[in-house]
Amino acid sequence: MKRIKRSFRLYAAWEYEKEEEDLNAASQRGWQLAKGGCFSSTFYKDESVRYIYQLDYRPHNIDMDRYKETFEEQGWTYINSTFNGWHYFCKLYKEGECIEDYKIYTDRESLYEMQNRWVGLVTTCFFLYLVFAGIHVVHFIRSKEVSLLIQAIAFILLTITFGLGVYNLRRRRKGLKSGMGLPIQIILPLAIVLLISAMNLIGAERHHLIYHTNFTYINKPEDTFTRLSDTLVIEEKGTYKIDLDIAASDGQMQVIIEDFNGNEVFDVTADRCTVNNHKLVMEAGTYDIYFQYLAPNYSIDTSQLSINIKLKR
């Protein structure tokens, strides 16, 4: 039987009492807290005991030895602390006693200060995500890009999450129970997954192939390799990446990319050359690509060159 397990659950600052309830329920099922955390907690199996768990919020600028000693005098056992100032305690539960009597002394002033900071931060995030959601909805309507719709949904979920957080925290400050709403354990991870999915879609879109040519030329003494050209259309300003492979048995190959004003944005001359993910900042417009074979000065019977060029974003 598995004796140790980890639980990955996320609790907002206004849900610390919900976390206490979940820890107490787990203890009743025989899973006792070994280490509490902001994102995950570790439990060990022991059905012979049952504990009541309480959380206390204190800034870290305290005398921890004196702090733990104060609660130990009240019968509480210190478990651990988190990086953001939450401290976990437990007390052995005696059958038949009221759970409501197991309340730890809490520095309410520090708790309220923390809650006030959260209200300000969460309120700011609420309006920011609301603006981001609106912007992405407008962009989606114009472009019909799926990634923008996914991002819009994610920001809407985050707006709901933080909106419910402010609402519930203010209710609790007034002594009222939290209102109805979707749990943050569902909304926040879902929003993060959607944002990651959107970023992956954007990454895929931004690395699609813009231009590709691949050819091999065999030069004979009676042939004259003229300067070849091609046209490249850039629809959107941005950073592009070029891959290039050149191999010439004799002489050299020159590749030039010129913008619509005749300015060179890329130039390479070599008999053998490999370029990977070379960045080019390009404006929207039409570009010319030139391929020029530079034959050697001495007479040759036959020469061969090959070129493979890709432009992607």
Image (tube, grey):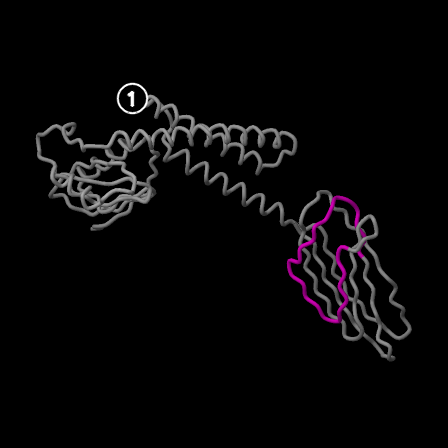
2 lies above or below 96: below
Segment colored magenta: 265-289
The answer to which quarter of the image holds residue 294 is bottom right
* Residue that badge 1 annotates: 177
Is 177 inside the magenta-drawn segment? no
Of the pair 203 and 105, the residue shown nearer to us? 105
Task: Tell how many labels.
Answer: 1
The x and y percentages for residue 199 are: 54, 43
Residue at the spot 20% in from the left edge and 50% down from the top edge:
3
Residue 291: x and y in percent read 81, 61
Residue 209 position in % (x across, y down): 67, 51
Dot 1, how many residues are within 10 Å of its Cα: few (below 14), some (14-19), or many (20+)? few
The residue furthest right is 222
Query: In the image, is 179 to the left or to the right of 294?
Result: left
Q: Residue 293 vs residue 196: left or right?
A: right
- Dominant secondary structure of the residues highlighted in magenta in the image: strand
Q: Is residue 223 left or right of residue 276?
A: right
Secondary structure beneath label 1: loop
The quadrant holding residue 298 is bottom right
| Amino acid type indicated by mark 1 | Lys
Q: Residue at x 62, y 32 (%)?
A: 139
Out of 304 and 268, give the one closest to the viewer.
268
154, above or below 298, in the image: above
Question: Which residue is at 36% across, 31% downward?
Answer: 183
Tell me where residue 84 appears, x and y as whole percent: 33, 41
Residue 271 sits inside the magenta stretch: yes
